[in-house]
Amino acid sequence: MTFSSVLQRTVILTFLALLGLGSSLAAAEDKLPLPRFASLQSGEVNMRAGPGETYPIMWTYQRAGLPVEIIEEFDIWRRIRDHDGVVGWVKSTLLVGKRHVIVRDSQRPLRASAEAGAKPVALVDPGVVLKVLECSADWCRLEVQGYKGWMMKTEFWGVYPQEMLED
């Protein structure tokens, strides 16, 4: 065996080993913690009774950005829970990591700063979905229809109490 063929064989084996390592690293990166929040990517998302297209459609969401909680994964399917507690399966391609929250129960003020007595910049009705810009210990900076402001984490659904998010 010549030096050239040994070198070529070594390069090929190293490349194949790196490919295997690369796919292992990619698989490890795909393993995000459960549960976690995500948002619906599309204005039409079918929730199914099981993880596959043969399972019946239980519900069709018609609201891009709606926050959901991913509670289980199976292949390309994610078992989610919505803000009303409804649980079902959606394709992972219909979810995005960009975070949104939804106001529940009653109208809430979006405040100029992260203080209980801060001036409201807008009043937000129940059911309104807001984009998350950042979150500190107790407050999140949110955006809706061009208005940006702060709301306490207890006033909406879509962020965990201990979660900190940066802009």
Image (spheres, helix red, strand yellow):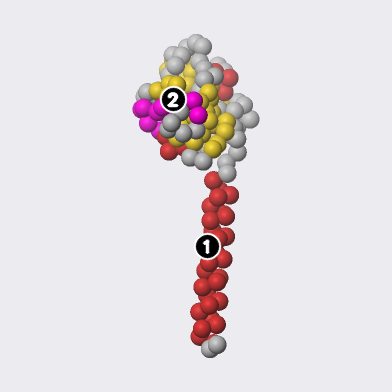
Q: Residue furthest front?
A: 54
Q: Is residue 15 visible?
A: yes
Name the residue beneath numbered marker 1. Answer: 19
Q: Amino acid at mark 2?
A: Pro
Q: Nearer the viewer, residue 152 or 129?
A: 129
Secondary structure of the residue carrying tag 1 is helix
Residue span colored magenta = 39-50
Q: Nearer the viewer, residue 5 or 115?
A: 5
Answer left or right for 47 relative to 152: left
Question: Residue 8, relative to residue 120: is it above or below?
Answer: below
Q: Is residue 143 visible?
A: no
Q: Position of residue 137 (x, y in %)?
A: 62, 29
Q: Position of residue 135 (x, y in %)?
A: 55, 31
Number of marks in the image? 2
Q: Residue at x 53, y 77 (%)?
A: 9
Q: Amino acid at mark 1?
A: Leu
Q: Residue at x 55, y 87 (%)?
A: 1
Quarter-wise, where is residue 69 in the image?
Answer: top right
Question: Residue 119, relative to residue 139: is it above or below?
Answer: above
Q: Nearer the viewer, residue 72 or 42?
A: 72
Answer left or right for 88 relative to 161: left
Name the residue beneath numbered marker 2. Answer: 56
Which mark is nearer the camera, 2 or 1? 2
